[in-house]
C-alpha cells in the first residue's frame, strides 16, 4: 500500500485491524520517511531498528483489541523512557538513560504502540521556538528556516511532516498548542491532573501537563483517551471519571454557548488573525452554537504572572541537576566549584535566565513582592474563568498572536518571545483544558490556529466543539516536502 | 515591544545582585555573562512590574488549581533493592556510592 505515512492514525488502525497492513509495514514506512527527513532535525534519539523488531514481534501474534495496535510513534524527549536516552533537550541530561518509564508513555505502550524515537524540544521545555534546544533548531515542514513553535517543536514538526502518525508533547504555557498552531496540526492541553506527570522531566509542576498532538481531532481524542489516567505516583493526579472520548465524539454542538473574550483583541494583532477569529465565530454559529460576549478582565496580567510562577517552580525543580547523581558533570576544585561549573556549562542561556529569575523572586525579601503577588493574581485569573463559565460552555480565541516566524528572528529579545504565549498561558494558570485546531492560512501561506478553552475536566465537550469546527473549516496543510532531495 | 538595552535605563538589578543570585543558583557567571543577564532580567522585570497595577490585599493566593485535598497513602515500601538502578547514571563510576570531590581536609 502506497503513501502509508499520509494516513491518519484512525486509518492506520483500521488497516491494521482489517489486516490490510501489518505493523511492520507501517513502522518501516515511518522509519524510511524519518530517515529521509534528517534536515528537519525533529529527532534527538532514533530508536528505529528496535521499533522494527518490536513491530515484527507484534505481527507474530497481533492483539487487535488494543487501542493502538502496532502503531509506531515518536514522543517528546521530555518523557522518561526506560533504557532509551532522555535528554529534555539539554546538555546536562545528554548522557541520561532512565531506568524507569513515565506513566503516560507506559499507557501508550500498554495499548500496543511502538516507540520510534525521542523528539527534539526546547531545553527543559523552556522556549516557544525550539531554538533553546542543545540539539539545535528544528525546521518547520511548512517552510525552510521557519520555527516549528515550542517547546514541543520536534513533536509538531514530526506530525506535520508525517514522520510519526501522532505524538505527545507537554504544555506548561502553550508548548503543545502554539507549535500545533504553527505547523497546522491539532494539539490538546488537558485539564491539570488528567495525565500523570510521573516520569516527565519537571519544569513548572503546578502548570505542566502532557497532551496529544495529531493530524485531526478524532486522532487527538483517541490518544487522549489512552494517556489520561489516575496515577497514585503523581500526587496531583486527579481521580475523576474519564470518558470514552472517541466513542462519545459528536459534531452536534447545537445550543452550546461559546464565549468570546474581548480582552483577547490585543494591540498589534495582525488583521489575518482577527479575521480568522471572526471566521471561527461564524463556523460555530453555523453549527448551531450560540455566541456570547464575555470578559476575562485580568488577561493582560497572565504573562507577567506566568513569568514569576513558572521560573520560581523551575528554579526549585532544576536544583536537582548538580552533577552528583546523574547527568553531566564538570570538573571543579571543590564540591561547590563543581556544582557551579556543572550548572553553568550544562544549562543553556534561557534555562539559566529562568533559574535566575526564579531564584530572585523566591529570595529573601522578594518573596512577598513577587511570588506571593503572582499567586494572588493567578487566583484573580482563575476567578475570571470561573465567572465566565457561569454563562458559557467553552471559550473561543486565536491560538497565537501571529503565524510562525523565522529562525533567529526573536532570539535576542526574551520578552518578545514570551509574548507568543499570550493566549495560551492563562489556560495553564487556571488549570483548564485547551485545544488548538488549524483554521486557516495567512498571506504567506503559513497556518494559523484557533483555540477552544473548556471547563475543567470537560475535554469531551472541548473535543466535540473542535470536531464540529474541523468539519466546517476543512483545513488542508500545504506541505511540499522541500527537505526531501 | 519592549526593547532591551542595558545602558539606556536605570538598572534595578545590578551586577552585584546578579552575582548574589548566581551564588544562590549555584551557576557560575563571568562578567560578560553577568552583564547580559542583568540586561535580560531588567527587561523581564520591567514587564513583570505590571502586576503592581493590581490591588491584591484581600485576595487569597492560589495554591492549587484543583479544589481537591492531597491524597494520603499508607507508609509502605512498594519497590526496593533499586541501588543498582539509582547508581546507574552516576557521572563518576563506582558501584556502591555517588562520588564527589573531597569535602573534608
Image (cartoon, rainbow, N blue to C red):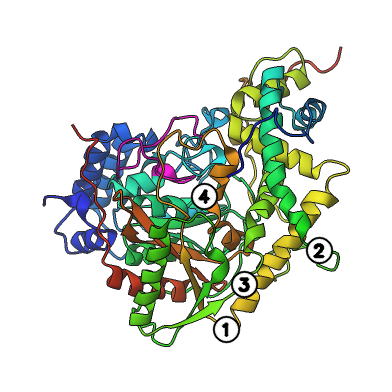
Q: Which residues are magenta?
A: A132-154
Magenta stretch: residue A105 in it?
Answer: no
Q: Is residue B5 above or below residue A198?
A: above
Residue drawn at point x = 46 percent, y = 46 percent = A152
Q: Which residue, given by chain and number where applicable, does mark 1 sit on?
A: A391
Please tell me whether the stretch drawn in magenta is mainly helix, strand or loop.
loop
Task: Please give left or right for residue B15 compared with residue A274 in the image.
Answer: right
Query: Viewer-nearest of labels 4 and 3?
Result: 4
Chain letter for mark 4, please: A
Q: Are marks 1 and 3 in contact (CB under 8 Å)?
A: no
Q: Which residue, given by chain and number where applicable, does mark 4 sit on?
A: A420
Residue A252 picture location, percent across and down: 35, 83
Q: Which residue, given by chain and number where applicable, does mark 2 sit on?
A: B55
Task: Please give left or right for residue B81 compared with residue A479 in the image.
Answer: right
Distance of mark 1 from mark 3, alpha carbons? Answer: 10 Å
Q: Which residue, given by chain and number where applicable, does mark 3 sit on?
A: A385
Q: Are marks 1 and 2 in contact (CB under 8 Å)?
A: no
- The circle on residue A309 is none
Front residue of this view, candidates A450 and A293 = A293
Q: Secondary structure at mark 1?
A: loop
Front residue of this view, candidates A428 and A74 = A428
Q: Are marks 2 and 3 in contact (CB under 8 Å)?
A: no
Q: Secondary structure at mark 2?
A: loop
Residue furthest to the bottom in view is A255
Residue A354 picture location, percent across and down: 66, 39
Q: Are marks 1 and 4 in contact (CB under 8 Å)?
A: no
Amino acid at each position: 500500500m502506497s503513501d502509508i505515512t499520509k494516513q491518519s492514525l484512525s486509518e492506520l488502525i483500521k488497516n491494521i485491524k482489517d489486516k490490510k497492513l501489518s505493523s511492520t509495514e507501517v513502522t518501516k514506512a515511518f522509519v524510511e520517511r524519518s530517515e529521509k527527513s534528517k534536515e528537519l532535525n525533529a529527532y534527538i534519539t532514533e530508536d528505529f531498528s528496535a521499533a522494527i523488531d518490536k513491530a515484527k514481534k507484534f505481527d507474530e501474534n497481533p492483539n487487535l483489541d488494543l487501542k493502538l495496535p502496532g502503531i509506531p510513534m515518536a514522543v517528546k524527549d521530555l518523557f522518561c523512557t526506560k533504557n532509551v536516552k532522555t535528554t529534555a533537550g539539554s546538555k546536562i541530561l545528554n548522557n541520561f538513560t532512565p531506568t524507569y518509564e513515565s506513566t503516560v508513555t507506559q499507557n501508550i505502550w500498554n495499548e500496543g504502540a511502538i516507540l520510534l524515537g525521542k523528539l527534539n524540544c526546547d531545553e527543559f521545555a523552556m522556549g516557544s521556538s525550539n531554538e533553546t534546544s542543545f540539539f539545535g533548531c528544528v525546521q518547520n515542514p511548512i517552510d525552510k528556516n521557519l520555527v516549528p513553535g515550542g517547546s514541543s517543536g520536534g513533536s509538531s514538526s514530526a506530525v506535520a511532516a508525517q514522520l510519526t502518525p501522532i505524538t505527545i508533547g507537554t504544555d506548561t504555557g502553550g508548548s503543545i498548542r502554539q507549535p500545533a498552531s504553527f505547523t497546522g496540526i491539532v494539539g490538546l492541553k488537558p485539564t491539570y491532573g488528567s495525565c500523570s506527570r510521573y516520569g516527565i522531566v519537571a519544569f513548572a509542576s503546578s502548570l505542566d501537563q502532557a497532551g496529544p498532538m495529531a493530524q485531526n481531532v478524532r486522532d487527538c481524542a483517541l490518544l487522549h483517551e489512552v494517556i489520561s489516567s489516575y496515577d497514585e505516583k503523581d500526587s496531583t493526579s486527579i481521580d475523576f471519571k474519564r470518558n470514552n472520548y472517541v466513542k462519545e465524539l459528536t459534531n452536534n454542538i447545537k445550543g452550546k454557548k461559546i464565549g468570546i473574550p474581548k480582552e483577547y483583541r490585543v494591540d498589534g494583532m495582525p488583521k489575518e488573525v482577527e479575521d480568522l477569529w471572526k471566521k471561527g465565530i461564524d463556523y460555530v454559529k453555523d453549527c448551531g452554537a450560540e455566541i456570547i460576549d464575555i470578559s476575562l478582565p485580568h488577561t493582560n496580567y497572565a504573562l507577567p504572572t506566568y513569568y514569576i510562577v513558572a521560573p520560581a517552580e523551575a528554579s526549585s525543580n532544576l536544583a536537582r541537576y548538580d552533577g552528583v547523581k546523574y547527568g553531566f558533570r564538570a570538573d571543579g576544585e571543590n564540591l561547590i566549584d563543581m556544582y557551579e561549573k556543572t550548572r553553568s556549562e550544562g544549562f543553556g542561556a534561557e534555562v539559566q535566565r529562568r533559574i535566575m529569575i526564579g531564584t530572585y523572586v523566591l529570595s529573601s525579601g522578594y518573596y512577598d513582592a513577587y511570588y506571593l503577588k503572582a499567586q494572588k493574581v493567578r487566583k484573580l485569573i482563575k476567578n475570571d474563568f470561573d465567572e465566565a463559565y457561569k454563562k458559557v460552555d467553552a471559550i473561543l480565541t486565536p491560538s497565537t498572536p501571529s503565524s510562525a516566524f523565522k529562525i533567529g528572528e526573536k532570539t535576542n529579545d526574551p520578552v518578545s518571545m514570551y509574548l507568543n504565549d499570550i493566549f495560551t498561558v492563562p489556560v495553564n494558570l487556571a488549570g483548564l483544558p485547551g485545544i488548538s485546531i488549524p483554521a486557516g492560512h495567512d498571506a504567506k501561506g503559513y497556518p494559523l490556529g484557533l483555540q477552544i478553552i473548556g471547563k475543567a475536566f470537560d475535554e469531551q465537550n472541548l473535543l466535540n466543539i473542535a470536531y464540529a469546527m474541523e468539519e466546517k473549516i476543512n483545513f488542508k496543510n500545504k506541505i511540499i516536502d522541500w527537505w526531501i532531495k | 515591544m519592549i526593547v532591551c538595552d542595558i545602558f539606556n535605563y536605570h538598572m534595578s538589578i545590578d551586577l552585584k545582585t546578579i552575582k548574589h543570585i548566581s551564588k544562590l543558583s549555584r551557576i557560575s557567571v563571568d562578567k560578560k555573562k553577568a552583564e547580559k543577564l542583568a540586561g535580560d532580567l531588567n527587561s523581564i522585570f520591567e514587564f513583570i512590574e505590571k502586576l503592581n497595577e493590581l490591588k491584591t490585599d484581600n485576595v487569597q493566593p492560589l495554591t492549587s488549581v484543583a479544589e481537591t485535598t492531597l491524597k494520603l497513602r499508607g507508609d509502605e515500601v512498594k519497590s526496593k533493592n533499586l541501588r543498582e538502578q539509582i547508581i546507574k547514571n552516576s557521572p563518576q563510576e563506582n558501584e556502591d556510592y555517588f562520588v564527589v570531590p573531597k569535602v573534608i581536609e
